[in-house]
Image (cartoon, rainbow, N blue to C red):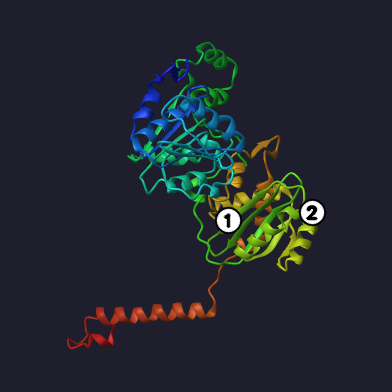
Amino acid sequence: MGLYIETPLSKIIHPHKYQTLILLTRTKETACVTGQGSGKSSLVPVWLGTQMMNRGTGEYAVTEPVNSMVERVAIRYFLDFVKGTELEGDWISKKYNIYGTNYGTVNFYSTEIPEHIQGSHLKAAVMDEAGQSPRLAYTTLRGRLNLFDGQLLMLSNPYMKKDPWLFLDLKKRYDEGDSTVLYLSFPSIANPAFSRKVYERDKKILTPEEFSFQHLGVYIKPQGLVYDYDRSAVVKEVKYNGETCFAGGDFGFDSTTLEIGFVNTVALHLVNEYFKVDIEPSGHVRAFAELIKRYHINIIFYDPAARAFMSEIQKGLTELKVPVKFEKANNDVHDGVREKNRALKGGKLIIDPKCYHLLDEDMGYIWKNGEPSGERHCEDASRYLIMGVKNFLHREYAPTKVEKKAKDWLAEHFQNLYDKVMNPKRKENIDWRDIF
């Protein structure tokens, strides 16, 4: 039995206890991480419809991690629920997935390009399969809710090979007592409609990790991660103030990637990335040109095996009169992995959340038979960059003669001040203006 029953005149909702809690809570942010078949997707239109009827006319939103799911899941479930009810309306723009009702408009978004979730102030929003969306989509959507102090509902399975921001950020805040967050986790069988027979069968045949993911809603860190780091120490918003940047590039017909960063006395700061699938090198030229100008990119370190692809991009940039050097990268995988791990463990690598493709790949990059395995387009690009700047990254910063002289003068000056004040033989009629 589903979440609601249809009658000729209405839809009767009969949620299970966890769905009831989610529908009734007034918490600003609710994260619900569960097993498969627990009733997440069917809850989306019911929760959103309840918000619309309670909050009245305004703008609302539903997001899915990819475009194909917007039409196949979000829109289909919503239209099925509102059909024949007072929430039923019509399309304002089918092209842009904007649906209008008497209670407001609903925007259906994909989070593939989080920056596109802009332009409206929302009264409520749902992130379906939030664990497959980048954290940047969450922060962007959260910002769109601030004007009306709107509620945000995040529903997901505990994805093991994606950047686990939902677990690491939202659950951490909830555990630390943040009253604006509710974090729920419950198994598939919390939904009375889910087959207990299937649950018990899978419990016997699946590995504990698989069973936890599919049916318990419990996040388990993948075993054998190539880069096993403390996210809170590495993933931080990077302030870019016009520094000269470098980039690592992985070029190819399946995808082309750039990881962009600058080096200072503290670390290598990855400020942004580029990720696009286009079999034609010319399809990347204008985007490269914009990034080179925006981040003052001086050198792009690339895989020598992709020289032909690189040459086409270089030719296009020359025609646009955008200067940048292309240098062959050290593409030895094990050398690059060691150097990246050295930077991570030494606190020499900071990654902005905008580099979400890289963060996703990091969580699925695993040792298998002595070799790194998993998606590696961004991994390769980041290795090329790190190998290219490693001499800058690990250099010792000795003070210049001017810096040393200034430090010595300051030390002597304040020592003299201390001696004058603390000398017990000092005269009582000291003119303090001479000291300070």
Amino acid type, residue under disc 1 in the picture = Leu
Query: Is residue 230 visible in the rendered structure shown here?
Result: no
Secondary structure state at the residue bearing disc 1: strand
* Residue where numbered disc 2 is placed: 309
Q: 245 or 431, which is in the foreground?
A: 245
- Check whether the beta carbons of the residues at disc 2 and disc 1 lie within 8 A of each other: no
Q: Nearer the viewer, residue 246 or 263?
A: 246
Report x, y in % for residue 231.
Answer: 51, 45
Q: Residue furthest right?
A: 308
Residue 251 pos. (x, y %): 74, 51
* The disc label shown at residue 270, or none: 1
Which image quadrant for residue 14? top left
The kind of residue tagged 2 is Phe
The picture quadrant where one finds residue 420 is bottom left
Rendered view: 136 above or below 326: above
Q: Is disc 2 placed on a helix, strand or loop?
A: helix
Closer-to-camera residue (304/24): 24
Find the residue positioned furthest to the top: 197
